[in-house]
Image (cartoon, helix red, strand yellow):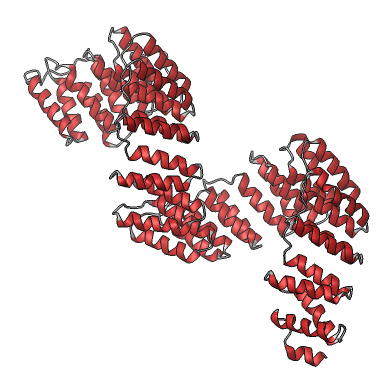
Amino acid sequence: MAMVILQRVSSSCSSGKLFCISTSLLNFNSTTINNHLNPSFSISTTSITDKNKNKNPVDLENVIRVKCKSGNLGVDEALDLFHQLIQMRPLPSIYPFTQLLGFFLKMKYYLTVFSFWKLMDFERIKSDIATFNTLINCSCYVGNVDLGFAVLGKMLKLGLEPNAFTFNTLLKGLSMQRKTTQCLELFYKIANNGYSYNEVTFVVVLNVLCKSRKVGDALKLFRAAVETGKLKPDVIIYTTIIDGLCKEYRLKDALNLFMEMSGKGIVPNVITYTSLICGLCNSGQLKGALSLFEKMLEKQLSPDVITFNILIHSHCKDGKTDEALNILVEMLQRGDKPNVITYNSLIHSLCNTNQWKKATELFNDMTRQRISPSVVTFNILIDASCKQGMIKHANELFVVMIQRGLEPNTITYNGLIDGYCLHGQMEAARKVFESMVTTSCKPNGRTYTILINGYCKAEKLDEVLPLLEVMKCNGLKPDVFTYNVLIGGLCKVGRIGEAEQLFKDMQAHGPSRNIFTYNALIDGLCVNGCISAAMELLHMMEIDGLKADIVTYTSIIDNMCKTGKLNEAKEIFYSLSTKELQPDTRMYTTMISWFFKNQMLNDARNLFKEMEEKGVAPNDHTFNIMVQGFLCGKKYPEAVEFLNAMNEKGFSPSAQVASLMLNLVAADGPNYETTDILRKFLFDANSPNESDILRVG
């Protein structure tokens, strides 16, 4: 029967099966182990055959020791050695058994570790501390630290004293499962009950504290341990805390600790410098990061790919793509090999700055160097292709991605759908969406919002509300952006009642309304002539604790002017300063335009002057409104004045203004001098050619 057991275990190992441990356990005994093994695995009470009883156990132990240390031991050979050990009489010591268990643990044959230990336990082979430590390690590797504690309980019951390795393994297991509280509780129990611990224990706990954003506690523990002589800090411990401080943006403290370690003669390593460089980059201190990088090189420390990636990413984030590319060149010149993350940062930055050709060249360079593009790489390129209007190319990339064995994710599909929506190809967008539904990659809230936004822009609102219901049925809750898009889309086609109903639904059971929600509905009400309702909504907005912005008031003022309520619009406009709001270029231009339409030329000019005095820069539209207004009001010197100012700013007359100027020149409306100036501006603006003007004249 024992041979059958071993054959089953051997079969499991040969097939590459790994051991998955189930739920937490209260104690560790034969039943516990049975519950975690293959149901078909059973122990016979038949004793092991004694065919190897005359073999020398010492010789076999020596073979196992040498094989395990050599690193050349294979799985099948290890199984055979265990077969020989378990059949030997008298039974060898626990030492070679533990060595083989350690080998199977290293090879990730977790089922084998527990199966063989069970067999050892059945044969009454007495496990020692190293054996139990191996079992605890195995438990933690499979993500069941509770089983590790059950093993610890078994050890204590047998009178075995756990050592520092035992507790360090359990602490690491808790850390891997992000059980910060339990990890700290265990540490204090170890310390308070006189159990063994060492510097590795402190490293694990300090690392846990730093990763859980409790670097202040880590620093206190570090100081206390050093002061009491329980910890002799080294580069690893200092680097762990420095990294934690950097991640919490406590750069001053991190740099002070860096100076402290250097002052104590502890030499910072590449990881220390990289942590600080990353912290400086994340805090927007790129110059400081580069300075530290130079010091690192002066110390003859070779930066690794992570260091370079941080600097490249930071330059890309700041829009300094050329500098980032120079770092790549430096990296290659030093003989350091970039990885997929390096290229992803650069390709993304090039795409964001519309340098599509360079991005493609870099992608080709990446593949030439046999660096396999990731899903992220393809997502960047697909998204950029769509935004550039190259939908066909995006689809080709999608096909290449699949051919390379990469599985498109939600971001991939969302990028394609968004691309089609941006260019009004809603049928194609819907087909991609439907193909996505048939895959294991399910649409998320953003997928639905992209489609809804596309339908709203295409004014196909009949497709939108059913899609919203499908979204809800699939357990996805529309967010505030989804509602804002819907409300804006409904308002755009005049379906104000439905927009108002959605607005009310948000109050009842939707996400909290924000400034954009109110602005969308207020604009819709204004455009559809419901100024009074818009003003009521403005009041409700204030009750909701939201402050109206310039966008809100621009909609109200513009539409008040359209409905002949210029005085009310002026009153609101001039009251904005009391609301701590500064009109922007669009709002000033809107008011100036309506002043001209109501023959209030002086008001328009004064408002333009005020605009400049307040530091709000007029744009080409503002200047065109000024020129058009004065030309229509037959104030030709003023029109010429603004044409000159417009020219100095590098702006050109719009088609509408050029047409008006052409008509005036053709009709000899202004005096000769003005007509001559208008001719000059017409030609400079590449408006209708001279023969057209002369023919009309």
Which of the pair 354/169 is nearer the observer?
A: 354
Count of numbered circles on the image: 0
**Residue 13 seen in the figure:** yes
Residue appearing at x 43%, y 24% in the figure: 219
Residue 694 image offset from top left, x and y in percent: 78, 92
Residue 37 shows up from this direction: no
The reply, left or right, for residue 368 in relation to residue 389 is: left
Q: Position of residue 122 (x, y in %)?
A: 25, 14
Front-lying residue, 606 or 370:
606
Question: Which quadrant is home to the N terminus?
Answer: top left
**Where is residue 642, by image quadrant?**
bottom right
Q: Nearer the viewer, residue 375 or 222?
A: 222
Where does the image place residue 384, in percent across and percent down from the top left?
54, 59
Q: Quadrant of residue 366?
A: bottom left
Q: Position of residue 617 (x, y in %)?
A: 72, 60
| Residue 536 versus residue 150 in the image, above or below | below
